[in-house]
Image (cartoon, rainbow, N blue to C red):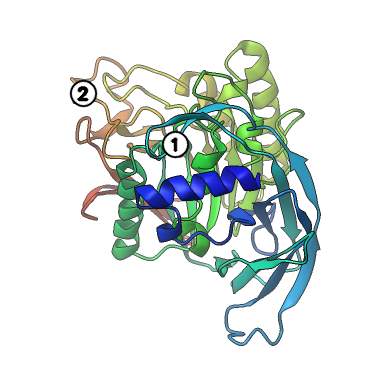
């Protein structure tokens, strides 16, 4: 793994580079904060280290403890990961290569946290030769506030040879924050062009929003694949540390969590392409909704679109709407189609995000041929689309706001519990 990172760092340094983006260390990488099952008191931390590590630990304290006097240190156990090793990939300079990705993967579950609290942490590494390394400081806020906000973004297809994709998405997140602050990020999939290319994840995780916020993420079809279209849940699973409460085979990929009084169910489209896969997923969703019937708000998220934004044809809506109606789902969120669509049906609001990479948006849509009675609004900017959503939640309502790249409000919907 050290060879992968040294080669990657030198390549990107020459191209204007990984170090310029604030690489923590060649020994610690891909640090990200994921929700615990109850995000009021639980978080899950994910990172990797080279295989020479003898130990890794997390030092954690409340953000107000600026001198870290009350910090506690937690040891973590790594597991050997070669999921991405030898996969055919591409460097930032356009050179073809095989990923040299053998490393130790760490998942650390935090519990007994205080609700409504800002925390800071860093990761410390010790190697076989006595070397020590320390990451930059990362932050997150636990749930529990009566009012909270999230940024919702998807489909930026991070691809080092075309850095403008990731830059456009990060600027879009800045525009959302300028509109109104947010407490965490909800990612609806396709953040990587090829999820099997681990160097893509390493570079992407250096961006500031991954240091400042908890990210709840979906597995998109691009996150699920390699350049040669090898498919695996393991690419997404080993890039994050989501709750392991999914159904068999889906642990850490399909999952659910509570953020305050809202239930989020996160689905993996890639394993429910046929009727058998959908039956397993839908049975699990029904059980999660039954077990969390007390949640004020119920949100279901998947990557594939509910409707095709080009003409309104039914997509995943046809599979799910009866279950959503039965259990009182308030908001169904999706991405993938690269066209913003807002629709409604029997109390459920369906929203799908636009793309955010300024490159892979769809061409302008025509008139609605289907579901004109359900679809209320559509939007994109053609092939070069950049947009994202701001979600504001209070005990009285959820407000979903679509923003364009300048942070201008394009659409808004309010949803009562």
Position of 369 compared to 18: left or right? left
Q: Is residue 166 above or below residue 150?
A: above
Q: Give the Cα distance between marks 1 and 2.
A: 35 Å
Position of 180 compared to 115: left or right? left
Q: Determine which residue is flagged by label 2.
A: 365
Residues 412 and 216: in front is 216
Local crowd size for mark 2, using a 10 Å CA cut-off: few (<14), some (14–19), many (≥20): some
x and y percentages locating residue 375 in the rendered image: 31, 29
Q: How many marks?
A: 2
Give the secondary structure at mark 1.
Answer: loop
Q: Is residue 27 above or below residue 355?
A: below
Give the secondary structure at mark 2.
Answer: loop
Local crowd size for mark 1, using a 10 Å CA cut-off: few (<14), some (14–19), many (≥20): many
Q: Determine which residue is flagged by label 1.
A: 91
The tag earlier along the polypeptide, 1 or 2, is: 1
x and y percentages locating residue 63 in the rendered image: 58, 78
Looking at the image, which residue is at 52% across and 18% down? Answer: 229
x and y percentages locating residue 182 in the rendered image: 43, 62
Can I make out residue 414 in this image?
Answer: no
The residue positioned farthest toward the top in the image shown: 275
x and y percentages locating residue 317 in the rendered image: 46, 23
């Amino acid at each position: 793994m050290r060879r992968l990172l040294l080669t990657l760092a030198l390549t990107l340094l020459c191209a204007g580079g990984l170090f310029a983006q604030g690489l923590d260390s060649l020994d610690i990488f891909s640090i990200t904060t994921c929700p615990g099952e109850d995000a009021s008191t639980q978080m899950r931390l994910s990172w990797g280290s080279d295989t020479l590590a003898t130990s890794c630990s997390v030092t954690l304290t409340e953000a107000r403890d600026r001198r870290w006097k009350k910090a506690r240190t937690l040891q973590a156990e790594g597991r050997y990961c070669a999921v991405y090793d030898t996969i055919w990939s591409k460097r930032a300079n356009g050179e073809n290569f095989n990923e040299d990705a053998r490393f130790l993967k760490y998942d650390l579950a935090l519990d007994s946290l205080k609700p409504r609290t800002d925390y800071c942490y860093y990761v410390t590494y010790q190697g076989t030769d006595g070397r020590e390394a320390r990451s930059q400081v990362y932050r997150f806020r636990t749930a529990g506030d009566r009012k909270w906000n999230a940024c919702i973004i998807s489909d930026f297809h991070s691809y080092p040879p075309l850095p403008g994709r990731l830059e456009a998405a990060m600027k879009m997140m800045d525009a959302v924050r300028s509109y109104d602050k947010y407490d965490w990020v909800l990612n609806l999939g396709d953040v990587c062009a090829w999820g099997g290319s681990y160097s893509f994840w390493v570079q992407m995780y250096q961006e500031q929003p991954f240091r400042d916020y908890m990210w709840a993420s979906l597995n998109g079809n691009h996150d699920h694949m390699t350049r040669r279209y090898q498919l695996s849940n393991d690419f997404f699973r080993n890039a994050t540390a989501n709750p392991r409460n999914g159904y068999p085979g889906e642990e850490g990929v399909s999952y659910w969590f509570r953020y305050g009084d809202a239930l989020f169910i996160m689905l993996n489209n890639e394993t429910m392409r046929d009727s058998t896969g959908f039956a397993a997923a839908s049975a699990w969703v029904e059980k999660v909704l039954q077990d969390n019937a007390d949640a004020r708000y119920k949100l279901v998220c998947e990557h594939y679109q509910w409707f095709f934004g080009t003409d309104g044809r039914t997509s995943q809506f046809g599979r799910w709407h009866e279950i959503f109606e039965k259990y009182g789902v308030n908001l169904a969120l999706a991405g993938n189609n690269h066209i913003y669509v807002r629709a409604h049906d029997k109390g459920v609001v369906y929203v799908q995000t636009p793309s955010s990479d300024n490159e892979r948006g769809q061409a302008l849509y025509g008139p609605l041929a289907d579901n004109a009675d359900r679809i209320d609004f559509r939007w994109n900017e053609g092939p070069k689309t950049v947009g994202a959503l701001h979600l504001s939640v209070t005990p009285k309502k959820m407000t979903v706001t679509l923003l364009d790249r300048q942070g201008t409000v394009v659409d808004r919907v309010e949803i009562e519990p």
